[in-house]
Structure formats: C-alpha cells, structure tokens
C-alpha cells in the first residue's frame, strides 16, 4: 500500500510541474524571443559602425557649379547634382 501511495505522489508532482511549469516556461520563452528580436531590430542600425560613414570623403573642389553650388572636380564637364554643363 505504501508503494502505491509513493508512486501516486510521484505522478502527482510530475503532473503538477507539467501543468504549472510548462505554460510558464512557454510564456517566458515567448517574451524573451519577442524582446530579443525587437531589441536586435531597433538597435542594429544605430550600433553598427558602417552606417556612420556613408558620406563620401571630402575631395578638394577647384570649382563650383554656377547653377546649384555643388563642388566640382577639375575634369568634370557636367554637375553631378543638377546635370548642368560646366
């Protein structure tokens, strides 16, 4: 009789852990997944060092477009900004 009672206690505890613990574990995993994905997406562009250097290096402009004021290199025949002939 004692063996049956001990076995029932074991199965009762196991079932209780499954019924209470499994949903809590699933909720925690879902929240952690959503938090991890949203944190990665919002912080990825700001924390990446490659996005800060999209501007071309400054070149020494010898002349400027009379139409838009864009700096021009010596060998250019048309303005890259507005397309006006130089």
Image (cartoon, rainbow, N blue to C red):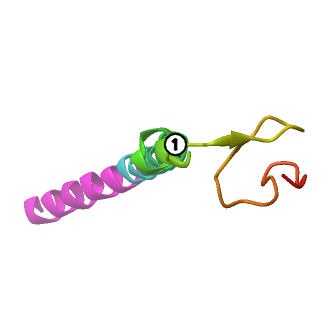
Name the image quarter holding the N terminus: bottom left
Image coordinates for residue 58, horizontal then vertical, percent: 52, 42
Residue named by callout 1: 58
Q: Is the stretch drawn in magenta largely helix, strand or loop? A: helix
Residue 12 x %, y %: 29, 54
- Asked if one can make out residue 8 in the rendered structure from this viewpoint, the answer is yes
Judging depth in this view, the residue of 54 and 9 nearest the camera is 54
Q: Residue at x 87, y 49 (%)?
A: 82
Residue 3 inside the magenta-drawn segment: yes
Could you classify mark 1 by the number of other residues whose Cα lies within 10 Å: few (under 14), some (14-19), or many (20 or more)? few
- Element type at marker 1? loop
Question: Measuring 81% from the left and 49% from the top, which residue is drawn there?
Answer: 81
Which is more toward the observer, 78 or 25? 78
Q: Is residue 34 magenta?
A: no
Give the magenta part as a residue range. Answer: 1-19
Q: Residue at x 25, y 52 (%)?
A: 13
| Residue 76 screen position, x and y as percent | 72, 59
Please say if 39 is above or below 84: above
Question: Image height check: is 12 above or below 36?
Answer: below
Q: In the drawing, does residue 9 fall left or right of residue 38? A: left
Left-right relation of 12 to 51: left
Q: Is residue 31 visible to us here?
A: no
> Position of 11 compared to 29: left or right?
left
Residue 49 drawn at (x, y percent): 40, 45
Please tell me which residue is depicted at 48% across the width and 45% down the height of the picture: 53
């Amino acid at each position: 009789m004692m063996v049956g009672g001990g076995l029932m206690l074991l199965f009762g505890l196991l079932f209780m852990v499954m019924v209470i613990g499994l949903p809590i574990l699933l909720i925690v995993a879902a929240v952690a997944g959503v938090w991890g994905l949203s944190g990665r997406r919002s912080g990825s562009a700001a924390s990446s060092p490659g996005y800060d250097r999209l501007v071309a290096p400054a070149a020494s402009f010898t002349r400027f477009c009379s139409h838009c004021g864009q700096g021009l290199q010596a060998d250019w025949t048309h303005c890259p900004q507005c397309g006006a002939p130089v």
